Image: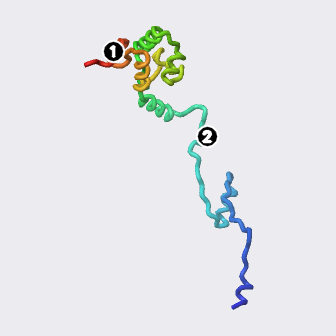
Amino acid sequence: MSNLDWDSKTVIGFKAKAPKVTRNASDLNAARRTGAVVATDKKVTAGGNKARPGPDHQRIAKLDRENEVAPPPKVNASVGKAIQTARMEKQLTQKDLAQKTNEKPSVIQDYESGKAVPNAQVLSKFERILGVKLRGADIGKKLEGPKKS
């Protein structure tokens, strides 16, 4: 029974053979003759011109253009004009208004030029500091104080 232990051998550092990629038929046939597992993959875009897309790509691009999502609405020009006139009446610069509202000066610039996407929180800050209505029907109208009963 102890003789069996002497007859067995352990191989350390034996690496399995990594798969080999071949491009010629002779290597492929030699592997088949030895009984190795052979898998062949054909490239789908072989021989095509990559610089010039085919007609399928053109149709896909056309579909993408048709399904475009509309950009978000921008602030009306009347809102920007109302912000600008109210700011001038209070003799505030864009930088001063930005500091009072805790916004960046670029945000005020975007609202005044009509490039900004409307945000209710930012507009309410502007309304409170400038004292002008910026949302709803009568944009640019002075805000009244709290109603006394």
Secondary structure of residue under mark 1: loop
Q: Is 4 left, or right, of 121 in this rendering? A: right
Task: In the rendered structure, find residue 144 and report the number of the disc placed on it.
Answer: 1
Q: Is 36 left, or right, of 79 in this rendering? A: right
Residue at (51% x, 24% y) in the render: 103
Identify whether 104 is placed above or below 43: above
Residue at (53% x, 16% y) in the render: 96
Q: Residue furthest left?
A: 149
Identify whether 17 is placed above or below 137: below
**Residue 15 point in image, percent of width and height:** 71, 65
Residue at (69% x, 57% y) in the render: 26
Q: CA distance from mark 1 to mark 2?
A: 74 Å
Residue type, label 2: Gly
Residue ID for mark 2 = 47
Q: Quadrant of residue 143?
A: top left
Secondary structure of residue under mark 2: loop
Q: Quadrant of residue 9?
A: bottom right
Q: State which quarter of the image contains the C terminus.
A: top left
Count the labels in the image. Answer: 2
Q: State which quarter of the image contains the N terminus.
A: bottom right
